[in-house]
Image (cartoon, coloured by chain):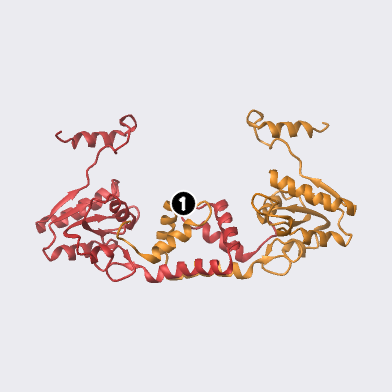
Chain colours: A red, B orange
Amino acid sequence: MAGYHVPPLERLVDQFESLPGIGHKSAQRIAYHVLNMSREEAQRFAQTITDAHENIHYCSVCCNLTDSDLCPICRSDNRDKSIICVVEDPRDVFALERTNEFNATYHVLHGAISPLGGVGPDQLKIKELLKRVGDGAVKEVIMATNPTVEGEATAMYISRLLKPLGIRVTRLAYGIPVGGDLEYADEVTLSRAIEGRQEL
Amino acid sequence: MAGYHVPPLERLVDQFESLPGIGHKSAQRIAYHVLNMSREEAQRFAQTITDAHENIHYCSVCCNLTDSDLCPICRSDNRDKSIICVVEDPRDVFALERTNEFNATYHVLHGAISPLGGVGPDQLKIKELLKRVGDGAVKEVIMATNPTVEGEATAMYISRLLKPLGIRVTRLAYGIPVGGDLEYADEVTLSRAIEGRQEL
């Protein structure tokens, strides 16, 4: 807006616009919402960001996000520690936990191998995974990386490291999503579903 | 997620979810983005919110947002102070300034009269408008409230207060939007466009 500058407001809008999935209009709307908050609410908002950033770190075992040394899953005695499910992102742990059918532990890589994106194996939490597997208590590692080129490459890379150690390495099944429509399934998914067909 | 609680993370997600236009998934995505920021970036984010909240207040003349006593428009000598354009929201000022054709001043009401929403004339900056108009230097007040029931009611209410003072009160023209399509224009807009037809 020519000639009309309110620097603290512009900085606030820019800050929100830099967040993922928020465009200029939404950022403006949010900035005005923040300005309409009470002083206490605005301070609590700022404090929540600082708190989260200071208190959340990686679990020393599985590298998931936690505010204590071990995450609740690694701390639990009811979890099967002999099975590790390897995921790319903390959000994937949330997704798998929602099934309520999985009682093993996780390992969060925080990314996937991507030569184009400049992410190599050293930037991922692969060393930490090998350390966990090293003590011999782990029987199976389930690769649950995303069904993308990067996720596949990461799964292959890790499975090659683990197989010589005599550990069973598995991969989540590919196929048509439940409730989906065959007509709209893509060719690759369909051919994977045919390959992976099971006895009835 | 049953059994997995990271309170600072949950508070961060809840905080973003409470912002307008952000659902749970987006809030999660933004929260992880914030956690991936550097410590300095996160502190700057928190500081931007506190700064904006502490430094931005209403212009003592037009009630628009500013970080000094007068907003840049009220401070400017190049603005025609005899015409005041009354809007509901600071964002409306930005929209009108984008036309680059308007050289008068504004007055921001910060809302519209809405009996259902519990907003009466006393909650709006109407007293401040009457004070500005009182000194006799103002010749015209342009009502640029939104074309909604609330905006119309507010415009009518204010025009009844101003007309006895001998001030010209006008309203933004209704009609079909430029670049729009007659076929898709709604009936009310079309009939307003016919009513307001002008000589060629």
Q: Position of residue A187 (x, y in %)?
A: 29, 33
Kindly identify the residue that appears in the image at 54 percent across and 67 percent down.
A42
Kindly identify the residue that appears in the image at 28 percent across and 52 percent down.
A96
Q: Residue furthest left?
A: A166
* Count of labels in the image: 1
Q: Amino acid at mark 1?
A: Gly
Q: Is B131 placed left or right of A91 in the picture?
A: right
Quadrant for residue B107, please give it.
bottom right
Kindly identify the residue that appears in the image at 22 percent across and 43 percent down.
A173
A49 or B125: nearer the viewer = B125
Please rate how many residues cluster around mark 1, counting C-alpha atoms within 10 Å: few if below 14, some from 14 to 19, many from 20. some
Instruction: Say if residue A1 shows up in the picture.
Output: no
Does B177 sit above or below residue B22?
above
Local secondary structure at mark 1: loop
Does B94 sit above or below residue B149?
below
- Image quarter where the N terminus of chain A lies is bottom right
- Image quarter where the C terminus of chain A lies is top left
Q: Is A89 placed left or right of A133 in the picture?
A: right
Name the residue that disc number 1 marks: B23
Q: Position of residue A27 (x, y in %)?
A: 55, 55
Q: Position of residue A45 (x, y in %)?
A: 50, 66
Does B184 sit above or below residue B132?
above
Q: Position of residue A199 (x, y in %)?
A: 14, 34
Kindly identify the residue that appears in the image at 61 percent across and 70 percent down.
B54
B4 or A156: nearer the viewer = B4
Does B188 sit above or below residue B92?
above
Q: Is A117 placed left or right of A142 in the picture?
A: right
Q: Is B40 placed left or right of B63 in the picture?
A: left
Instruction: Say if residue A60 shows up in the picture.
Output: yes
Chain ID at mark 1: B
